[in-house]
């Protein structure tokens, strides 16, 4: 078995009496594409918030590669290679796409506090940003402000920003949320084409997409991992069917 | 869908075009010399405008670029003013070193408070800046043995610049001095906002949530820019103390914090020249209207402010930029 890129050990989190994460154990091997599915309110986004440090777990540990990162701040986790995207576009509306990705590249290279040299003199950072945008077919529109881009392009920019940080592990929170079904396949094809060195955990509701792109599937219900398995195993699992169809149908 | 234009501007060129000096900028800075030749009787006013513009520039750096709203920026202005005044009172009246020491003192206060500022946003942040401003005001008020309290600081004695240029009644030296400092700080600020750091600041303004998710240490960036801004405000305060040989509590007052915010918003935040244009409008209006109606001149500023924020949300410069954009958009 290949080395683990990301794992969690007994993650717990509750808001008052509402338990949103209960004993979460995830093992994401390097280079794999895992899907995280589950009904609304199951705690999928909360789990991403816990892993990326936007929320602090009540108990448990998060391990990236060989390092315990539970105590690190969000931006420090990104520096180590654990990067997320957002379900609701979380972009820089009045920056152009090129500026936004260049910003992420400069921050990765530790140049974000350089204040004396003009930005255009950072040629390789700009080239790199442009290459990332071009690879997601945003090259032609890279000089437009983010808020002027089409919605689907903004979803791609979400991913472009994450790629600019050179992630080892990418957590994609419904990358195709709001994108018409015929375009979401295209978006996932771009994700499938990512370097095999990047491990991916993605949240997605469209089961066709999940079965097509995930090597393994985690099903989350009410703050806990209900079952984990290959797409074939999940498709055949009675409990998963009950969760999605409701047990009333089986009375 | 229309094909993009064939002339595919290279990404660097696109970014480089934003950095280049615009001809209008050169026109503007040449125009700042006009008071020497055409309005010599207004040189003291011009000097006050240059100082206010420097103060506005310092606020614009945190407000317009990093999105930090402050209602207590006079804290650093006053810190600079009192420091410059006090060191001259205690025997060292050399202006340039005084200026640097005063800026350093303001920067120190800025750095110390930046640790609190960097952790908060929105209303909490505004109240924090307001509170820190009030604290400093009352501290200076109660330490009247040092600051002169409500009577103002007495006994300021500034030596001639380079031991040669003394402060004349007309304000030739004062305006030259203020303008040179403003210009040098402006050039440095212009560089800063076009650097990767400037881009990071705009990132914080545009989306503070995303910044940590791309690995950016936002808090550290905010601490840095807040300190730089405090240094600039301190320079402005020191200039007012040195060119007028007076420092009063007004330098630390809430009114001064509010006035500078109005100047930046009038001119257009996040536009580098916004604060400068705003300070020109504000102080010229005050000069003219207070001649007509000394008690109610703020009425007109209030009216102008209401009009601008209602119809030109990006300030006067933002409105002009949109006008130009509309013209270009015509077939």
Image (tube, coloured by chain):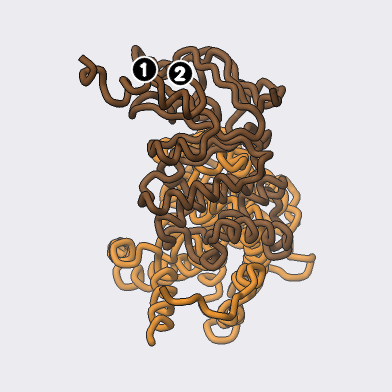
Chain colours: A brown, B orange
Q: Which residue is mark 1?
A: A239
Label 1 Cα crowd, 10 Å radius (few <14 / some 14-19 / many 20+): some
Q: Position of residue B157 (x, y in %)?
A: 68, 55
Q: Position of residue A3 (x, y in %)?
A: 70, 25
Q: Chain of mark 1?
A: A
Q: Position of residue B190 (x, y in %)?
A: 63, 64
Left/right placement of residue A181 relative to residue B154 reads: left
Q: Which residue is mark 2?
A: A227
User: Residue at (37%, 49%) from the top-left corner?
Assistant: A181
Identify which residue, B330 or A200, lies in the foreground: A200
Q: Secondary structure at mark 1?
A: helix
Residue B107: mark in rendering: none
Q: Quadrant of residue B219?
A: top right
Q: Image height check: is B284 above or below B218?
A: below
User: Residue at (62%, 35%) from the top-left corner?
Assistant: A199
Label 2 Cα crowd, 10 Å radius (few <14 / some 14-19 / many 20+): some
Q: Secondary structure at mark 2?
A: strand
Identify which residue, A21 or A179, lies in the foreground: A179
């Amino acid at each position: 078995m290949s080395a683990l890129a990301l794992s969690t050990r007994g993650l717990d989190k509750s808001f008052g009496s509402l338990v949103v994460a209960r004993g979460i154990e995830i093992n994401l091997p390097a280079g794999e594409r895992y899907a995280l599915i589950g009904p609304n309110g199951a705690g999928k986004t909360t789990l991403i918030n816990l892993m990326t440090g936007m929320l602090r777990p009540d108990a448990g540990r998060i391990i990236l590669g060989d390092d315990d990162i539970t105590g690190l701040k969000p931006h420090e986790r990104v520096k180590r290679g654990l990067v997320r995207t957002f379900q609701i576009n979380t972009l820089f509306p009045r920056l152009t796409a090129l500026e936004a990705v260049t910003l992420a590249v400069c921050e990765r290279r530790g140049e974000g506090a350089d204040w004396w040299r003009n930005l255009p003199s950072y040629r390789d950072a700009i080239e790199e940003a442009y290459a990332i945008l071009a690879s997601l077919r945003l090259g032609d529109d890279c000089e437009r402000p983010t808020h002027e881009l089409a919605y689907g392009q903004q979803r791609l920019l979400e991913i472009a920003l994450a790629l600019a940080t050179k992630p080892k592990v990418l957590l994609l929170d419904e990358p195709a949320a709001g994108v018409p079904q015929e375009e979401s396949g295209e978006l996932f094809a771009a994700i499938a084409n990512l370097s095999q060195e990047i491990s991916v955990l993605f949240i997605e509701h469209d089961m066709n997409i999940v079965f097509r792109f995930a090597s393994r599937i985690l099903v989350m219900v009410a703050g806990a991992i209900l079952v984990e398995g290959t797409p074939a195993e999940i498709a055949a699992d009675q409990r998963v069917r009950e969760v999605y169809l409701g047990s009333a149908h089986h009375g | 869908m229309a094909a993009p234009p064939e002339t595919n501007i290279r990404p660097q060129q696109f970014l480089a075009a934003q950095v280049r000096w615009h001809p209008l900028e050169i026109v503007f800075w040449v125009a700042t010399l006009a008071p020497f030749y055409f309005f010599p009787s207004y040189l003291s006013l011009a000097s006050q405008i240059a100082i206010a513009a420097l103060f506005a520039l310092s606020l614009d750096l945190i407000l317009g670029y990093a999105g930090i709203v402050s209602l207590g920026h006079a804290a650093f202005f006053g810190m600079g003013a009192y420091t410059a005044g006090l060191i001259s009172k205690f025997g060292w009246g050399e202006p340039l070193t005084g200026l640097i020491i005063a800026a350093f003192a303001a920067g120190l206060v800025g750095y110390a408070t930046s640790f609190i500022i960097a952790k908060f946003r929105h209303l909490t942040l505004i109240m924090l800046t307001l509170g820190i401003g009030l604290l400093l005001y009352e501290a200076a008020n109660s330490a009247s043995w040092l600051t002169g309290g409500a009577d103002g600081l007495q006994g300021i004695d500034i030596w001639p610049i380079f031991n040669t240029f003394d402060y004349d009644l007309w304000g030739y030296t004062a305006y030259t001095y203020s303008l040179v400092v403003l210009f040098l700080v402006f050039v440095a600020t212009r560089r800063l906002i076009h650097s990767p750091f400037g881009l990071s600041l705009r990132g914080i303004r545009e989306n503070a949530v995303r910044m940590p998710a791309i690995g950016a240490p936002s808090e550290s960036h905010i601490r840095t820019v807040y300190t730089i801004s405090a240094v600039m405000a301190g320079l402005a305060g020191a200039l007012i103390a040195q060119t007028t040989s007076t420092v009063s509590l007004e330098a630390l007052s809430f009114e001064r914090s509010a006035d500078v915010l109005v100047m930046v918003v009038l001119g257009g935040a996040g536009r580098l020249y916004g604060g400068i244009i705003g300070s020109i409008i504000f102080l010229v209006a005050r000069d003219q209207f207070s001649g007509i109606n000394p008690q109610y001149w703020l009425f007109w500023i209030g009216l102008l402010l209401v009009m601008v924020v209602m119809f030109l949300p990006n300030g006067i410069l933002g409105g002009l930029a949109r006008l130009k954009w509309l013209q270009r958009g015509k077939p």
